[in-house]
Amino acid sequence: MPTKTHSPATTEELSAILREASALGRTITPTGAGTKLAWGNAITTDDTISLANLSGVREHSWQDLTATVGAGTTWSALQSQLARHHQRVALDPLFPERATVGGILATNDSGLLRMRYGGLRDLVLGMTVVLADGTIARTGGKVVKNVAGYDLPKLLTGSFGTLGIITEATFRLHPLPAHTSTFTARSADIAALADLMQHLVTSAMSLEAMQLRNEPDAFALDIQFAAVPEALDDHEQRLRRLASKLSLEPTTVDIYTTREQLFAIPNATILKLTTLPTKLSALIAGFAQLAAHGITAQAVADPSGIVTVALVAPAAGLATILEDLRARLAPIGGTAVILQRGALPTDIDPWNNPAHPPAALDVMRAIKNEFDSHRLLNPGRFVGGL
């Protein structure tokens, strides 16, 4: 049979499509806006299912700070509707104007706000998902306090569409901050910025977001507070005392687009690294030193230990850098994942060194077998060929 593209308008229509595909043994790739289809292993499937028609905010219980939304809704459209009641999902994923709720959930994408509000798994209360055999499963709930049963939304978040196709999600909401102030501290000494970052993380100030990055001639720490105006004035005074030996000025750029801008660098290879927070400064300092070898490296990190770095270098140099990073990060439980290949050879595993598979790979395979025993949903895209 030829390749098909399906665009179901309801969860029930999707269920019927998957029942037929399961009976015929046809493999499926679910898509939203396609902003992250290059993440993970490259695969080819028999059919594609577009979730674009499964869009719109289905329910906004602004009194309870929850909202239920279709998976094909763009992130910016969701946030615009919630903002009418001065609320939001406290998450800043990549490409919000195009990326859909389902794709963001499938890839577990988040940004700077996770430092204060937690990651995506902390914000999802419930889901509707269609399994490979067409079964419709509703898991979680539509209230913040929900302790019944296993928390399947946490399992499905970040599963890259290999366990089921999410059609609807319910989120925990937070108020939009009425007042914010953002500053950038700069120094040629990254250790000074790392000390400031640690002071701020452990302070009682209303820290909304923070990121550490390298610039051509220095390092920078972007700091955003969210509080009432009187508290913001107090925070600025305290920050200036803490940063008295650093260059400190109000920031005029949008810090929430800094990570996204890395993907626009021509021919860039984009890596997502995880490391211990105490190792961040050394890692970013190492990237700055690559300039002496003719390699461009721009890195953005948040205090939780997640780093996004854009590298521009010959293919052989990139492969060596990636191998070195994986060797250095593995002993401390860190990872180096390819988000955008650039000049990296296609035979390099995007997830990890195949010689050192994740310790939980056997468990992950068992879960895949339970949810999709015939390997119909995105087969091979995830870690270890799942």
Image (spheres, helix red, strand yellow):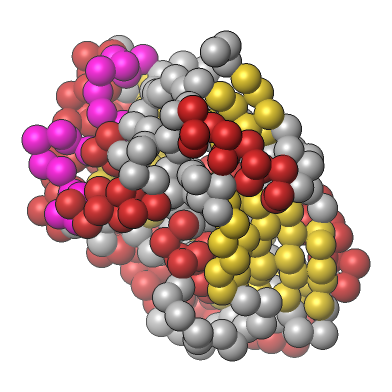
Where residue 84 sits, quadrant-wise, is bottom right
Q: Position of residue 53 (x, y in %)?
A: 78, 40
222 shown above or below 24: below
Task: Answer left or right for 122 relative to 173.
Answer: left
Task: Answer left or right for 253 relative to 157.
Answer: right
Start-end of magenta stretch = 343-361
Measuring 72% from the left and 43% from the top, which residue is drawn there?
A: 13
Image quarter in which the N terminus is found: top right
- Choose between 362 and 172: the one closer to the eye: 362
- How many labels sit on residues? 0
Magenta includes 124? no
Magenta includes 348? yes
Measuring 70% from the left and 81% from the top, which residue is drawn there?
A: 227
Q: Position of residue 205 (x, y in %)?
A: 55, 83
200 shown above or below 33: below
Image quarter in which the C terminus is found: top left
